Structure formats: structure tokens, C-alpha cells
Image (cartoon, grey):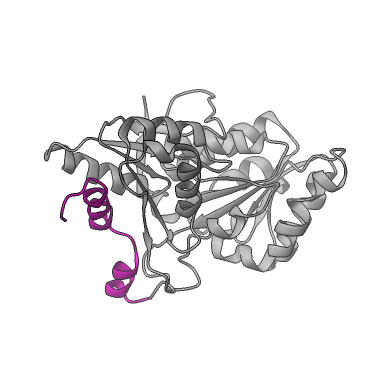
Amino acid sequence: MRTISFSQATLEAMQEEMRRDPTVFVYGEDIVRQGGIFGQFKGLPEEFGDRIRDVPISETAIVGAALGAALTGTRPVADMHFADFIGVAFDEIANQIAKNRYMFGGQANIPLVIRAPDGISKQAAAQHSQSVEGWVQNIPGLIVVAPSSPATAKGLLKSAIRQNDPVIFFEHKVLYPQKGPVPDGEYFTPIGKAEIRKPGTDVTLVTYSIMVQKSEEVAMELEKEGISVEIIDLLTLKPFDTATILESVKKTHRCVVAHEAVVSGGLGAEIAARIQEKAFFHLDAPVLRVGAKDRPIPFSPVLENYIAAQKDDIRKAIYAVLYREG
């Protein structure tokens, strides 16, 4: 299996889907001029011409136009530049895109994808470093995904583009240059299905996006101590795969949820509640959550590392649910 970067994997997904379907088009800020701020669109303008467009700095216009385009039968892919800027277009996302199919009685599809680079990276500070999946998690009508590897990035993006419902596609900025195996030919990562990245017997570790890597590193270290960690990569955050989580928890009887977003109001709270509702009597310890501290992301590298969830936070949480000191 060949090895390519996360950025190249998303580029391949775009190329394949645009070649297959002439109604797919892309627009955002600096896509043609720069190839995207992280280079994830390089080469598309040369092949697809005016189906790749630069637009003014107005997220409201970008997302609003995507809704109109989707309603008229095309499949727009709108780039948010940074996920933080979703807030500028929140009315379009929450009150229009997420609700139009329902309000039209199912007579209209909303086949659009909003690509949103997120996460802590290179001291980008408070307005360009957030993990904002919690903002959209509470909105019915949206699908939310977050790949963790080049292979899942390509497979999820292709699946997202072919959906008839709106998809928020969170792609962590740190992942773009990272390389990994990606299958040749066309393939899809199913939406709504989690992946067991590592089987284990002692504790279930539910995670996604960049935290999958940190979780795998911790799990390998704990194996040397005789602790077997089962890692579940959610991939789809809304609707997440409750069945896979519950099956694992019923086996291990303990669970930790780790994400880069702040703990307060994060996805970990919903997962913990779902486990408590459906598998309470299988638990031998409370479900613990790991995430960022409830503060804006600082510019200072030292403070940024302090605010962010680290491998040691995951390790301590696993020790705690196993009733060990750490």
C-alpha cells in the first residue's frame, strides 16, 4: 500500500469526486491563488478551471451561497480557511443548512460539505486554534466527521461529498503533512461507523482526530505495564457509533474519552451520558474525560502546551479508572 500525506489524500478525494461528478465544485479564500492555506487544494484550479474559485473574505457569503447552490442541484464544497470562522456563518449553518430539508418536507436535498481546518497548531493563538465540534454537535440536521489519518481523510471526504445531507468536515491542521498508508483505487470510509484502532481488554479509550495518535502512543506504553487499552476512533462525531462504544465498554467495564476540545460541554460529556444511560451496570468505574482546560488557547508555546490535553493526561485518566495511582 502506498504512503501519502493527509493533505494529498484529501486532494485525491477531491480530484476523484470532481472527475466523476461535474456538479461538484469548490470555493473559499485563497484556494486558487495559494492552493489553500495548508496546500490542500494545490493543482485543482489547473485541472478544473472555474469549478475552483476564490471568494471575498466573507464566511457568511461562502456558506450562504453553498446552501443556494446545493438547493439548485450542485454539490458545493466550501472551505472555511479555519474552523474558528464557522462562528461568522453560524446562522446559515444552524438555521438554514441544517433545517431546510426538514422545513421543505424532504423535497430538497442539501448535499454540501463545509471543510473546516481545526485544532492547536504552531502558536496560532486564541482565534485560530480552536476545536469547535461542540458548537455544531447540538444542531439536528448536520453530519459531523473528523478523520484521524490519510486513509480515513480520503475515505470520509468522498463519503461526505456523496451525502445528500450537509456535512461538517473537521480536519486537524497538524495532520496535513503527516503520512500514512492509503489504499489504491476508489474506496469509502462509512459515515456513522467507528473504527477499533487497537483491541484491548482493560479499558476503552474513545477518541478522534489528532488525539488518536496520542492515545495510541499511550496505549503502547501502557502495554509494557500489562495494561490493555482498546482504542475506538469515532471518525463520525454526529451521529457517533454508540453500538461500538457500548460493546467495548461491556467488555472492558471502564472508559476514558479523550479529545482536544475543552472538556466543558465537549463531545466527551455526551458519550459519557450515553454510556451511563445504556451500560451503567457494566461499569466498574466512572467514565472520565480528557480535554483542554476551559481557557482560550494562548499564543505562548509554554501556556499552549499547558492548556492542551497531553499524553500524560490520558495516562492519568486510565490509571484512575483502573484504581491505580498516577
Q: Looking at the figure, which quarter contains the N terminus? A: top left
Visible residue check, residue 298: yes
Residue in view at x 27 percent, y 73 percent: 302
Identify whether 139 is placed above or below 9.
Answer: below
> Where residue 201 sits: x, y (%)?
26, 31
Q: Is residue 34 magenta?
A: no
Q: 80 and 37: which one is in front?
A: 80
Left or right, 76 with respect to 228, comes to right
Helix, strand or loop for the magenta stretch, by majority:
helix
Viewport quadrant of the C terminus: bottom left
Res. 3 visible in picture? no
Q: Nearer the viewer, residue 124 or 267?
A: 267
Label tally = 0
User: Residue 199: percent from the left, percent from the top?
Assistant: 30, 29
- Residue 295 sits above or below residue 78 on the image: below
Q: Which residues are magenta?
A: 299-326
* Residue 308 found in image quarter: bottom left
Residue that lies at the very extreme toward the front in this rendered image: 281
